[in-house]
Amino acid sequence: MKKYILELTNFLAGALGMIIELVAARILSPYLGNSQLIWTCIIGMMLAFMSVGYYIGGKIADKKPSKSIMSLFLLNAALFTSLIPLIEVEIIKPLSGLTTKINPSIIAIICSSITFGPTSLFLATISPFAVKLKEIEYEKENNIGKISGKMSALSTIGSIVGTFTAGFILIPNIGVKNIILISTIIIFILSFILYEEKTIPYIIKSILTITILMGIIIHGKTLFHKSNPDIILDTDSEYSRIWIRKINKSSKQIYTLEADKGYESISTNNGTLYSDYMKYYDLFDYYNSNTQNVLMIGGAAYVYPTYFLNTFKNKNIDVIEIDPKMTRLAEEYFNLDTKNKRLSIHHQDGRAYLNNTSKKYDCILIDAFKGINAPFHLATYEAVLNSKKALNENGILIANIASSLEGEESDFIKHEYSTYKAVFDEVKLFKVQGNIFQENELQNLILIGFKNAPQADTEKKEIYESLLKNELIEFKSNKPIVTDDFCPIGV
């Protein structure tokens, strides 16, 4: 092992760099979201810090080529990795509250830089050091190109292994905080192994150092729970970092499920709908009272599907939820009965299901747009057209969209309104909260597309009058339709 310690260190530095990048994205997501903007900032800043690390590492390696210097760089990487849980509570959380005053991309760049920038920098110094030390080891052979290529390949392979290991194994199964702990320990062990003069005082200092680093991580986890006492579960799945909160409000216990800065579901667990926008999904019963089979894209905590099964006893619902862990959490915390014969659950992407299903529905409900960070592939002309093809005659599509009606955050609804108008025979838009919100405020809007003319059941008009009165009759859009080729909305 000693013979290949430089190769092993270089490989692990590449792997750990990518693992920590993915962990950083999960750390940031509850505060800044998980949009394309955030990923652009994370990748861009990681590459920037790595570039600085390569330069510094190469320059120092030429002057002081020793494993002990490499050891000190790794020790610094371990220190900054251990600080991530503290940074989340003390820096990221306060900074995220400034996104209404400062451009979110600036906040994302600052948070990305602070969270994993120093760790990326120090890990990047390892590759040029490894190349230099190998060159010295083979000083009589003129093969610097071979050595450089070998070390670059090992670092890149490490990055690939780290990416797949973090995404497929570590994050879904052990969570980001435990990954931070393990990564800190591995980096520290590498630092200890590389140090060339392992005296008794050095060993004692090393024991004290790793104890302090572990204490920092534990303190960070403790601070998180103290600053978020209502979070009863902080977990990770393949797709999201998920928080479940238990909130006491107006003598009610409210449970919320949050993922990547978005409220996926809010429930009182008493069979009623807490969120007003979900009540508009019942309009299928007014506009197409013969509805038998319903498709819902976006299950999350399955609040509406559970309500649907309890309210409409003779109707069936299929739910598309990409994340199996969401379903398990809905069973555990939100009273989901997966054994109900009128419920069918499909764990796959909503667009993929629409592309391939041959089943026809009387109504499609979309609840997959988390705020303005929408999965764009469900918002395009092609996706909406596939939705229409999956509808029976006189079928309807009802989508919840978070947008303002005017101003900077109105692009989403205007693009979608134009797109729905291009696909459906008739389109209606409803303002969920009536006149409570101003037109330039972000709010829930319900967009309904009709295959053929609406077949309203006038006998039920009184039942749904409180919803129908909030239709926006005069709404118009000057925005173009969005397509798979050009979609300037969402993630």
Image (cartoon, rainbow, N blue to C red):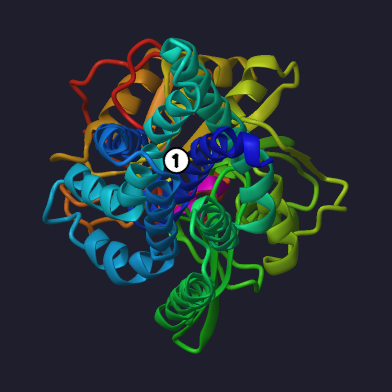
Is residue 477 inside the magenta stretch?
A: no
Is residue 278 inside the magenta stretch?
A: yes
Depth order, front residue of 194/343: 194
Residue 309: image quadrant is bottom right
Q: Is residue 49 above or below residue 349?
A: below
Q: Secondary structure at mark 1?
A: loop
* Residue located 48% across and 27% down the image: 134
Toward the front, the furthest residue is 140
| Residue 45 visible somewhere in the drawing | yes
Task: Find disc 1 in the rendering and name its residue.
Answer: 369
Q: Report x, y in % for residue 243.
A: 53, 63
Depth order, front residue of 372/269: 372
Q: Report x, y in % for residue 239.
A: 58, 43
Q: State which quarter of the image contains the N terminus.
A: top right
Q: Is residue 190 above or below residue 475?
A: below
Toward the bottom, the furthest residue is 251
Magenta residues?
Answer: 277-282
Q: State which quarter of the image contains the C terminus.
A: top left
| Residue 264 visible somewhere in the drawing | no
* Residue located 18% across and 60% down the image: 98
Depth order, front residue of 377/173: 173
User: Left or right of 336: which side holds 27?
Assistant: left
Q: Report x, y in % for residue 251.
A: 50, 89
Query: What is the chief secondary structure element of the magenta stretch?
Result: helix
User: Left or right of 347: which side holds 396?
Assistant: left
